[in-house]
């Protein structure tokens, strides 16, 4: 089974920027970032498919950017203009691609990295 190791995260002030990265132990077709805040359900932040197709959750669109290497072993999430509502544990995920070229999350997750936005 493929394993994921996340890095980055930490504390950032409102309006600031932060980046998190995820490395897979093998090549994959798709990777994504999800987050879960206390008392809330896990939500999609951004996904990337090996053909370059990206998708963003409503809260991330226009502020966050997902990118990865061509080999699809590493994915980065650049977060700009951060707000306290971005505070959550961020999880990396390995995805599948359905017949309509859409990302579908698998049950393979990283350990999570804490991101806190606070002054």
Image (spheres, rainbow, N blue to C red):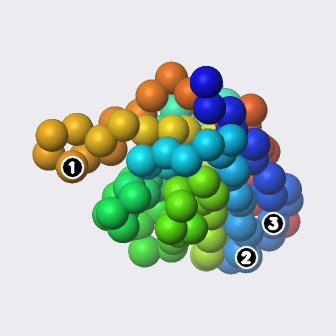
Task: Indicate the secondary structure of the residue bearing disc 3.
Answer: strand
Q: Quadrant of residue 12?
A: bottom right
Mark 1: few, some, or many residues within 10 Å (few <14, many ≥20)? few
The location of residue 35, given as percent across then percent down, is 58, 42
The location of residue 23, given as percent across then percent down, is 69, 50
Q: Is residue 55 above or below residue 89?
A: below
Horizontal arrangement in the rendering, residue 50 relative to residue 111 (left or right): left
Residue that numbered label 1 is attached to: 101
| Residue occupying image coordinates x 71% and y 59% | 20
Q: Nearer the viewer, mark 3 or mark 1?
A: 1
The location of residue 55, given as percent across then percent down, is 35, 58
Task: Indicate the secondary structure of the residue bearing disc 1.
Answer: loop
| Residue occupying image coordinates x 61% and y 75% | 81
> Which of 23/20 is in front?
23
Horizontal arrangement in the rendering, residue 94 relative to residue 74 (left or right): left
Residue that numbered label 2 is attached to: 16
Residue that numbered label 3 is attached to: 12
Mark 3: few, some, or many residues within 10 Å (few <14, many ≥20)? some
């Amino acid at each position: 089974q493929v394993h994921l190791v996340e890095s980055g995260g930490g504390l950032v002030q409102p309006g600031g920027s932060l980046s998190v990265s995820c490395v897979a132990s093998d090549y994959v077709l798709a990777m994504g970032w999800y987050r879960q805040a206390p008392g809330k359900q896990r939500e999609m932040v951004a996904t990337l498919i090996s053909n370059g197709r990206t998708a963003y959750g409503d809260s991330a669109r226009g502020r966050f950017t997902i990118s990865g290497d061509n080999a699809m072993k590493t994915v980065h999430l650049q977060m700009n203009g951060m707000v306290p509502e971005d505070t959550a544990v961020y999880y990396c995920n390995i995805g599948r691609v359905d017949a309509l070229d859409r990302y579908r999350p698998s049950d393979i997750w990283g350990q999570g990295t804490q991101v806190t936005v606070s002054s």
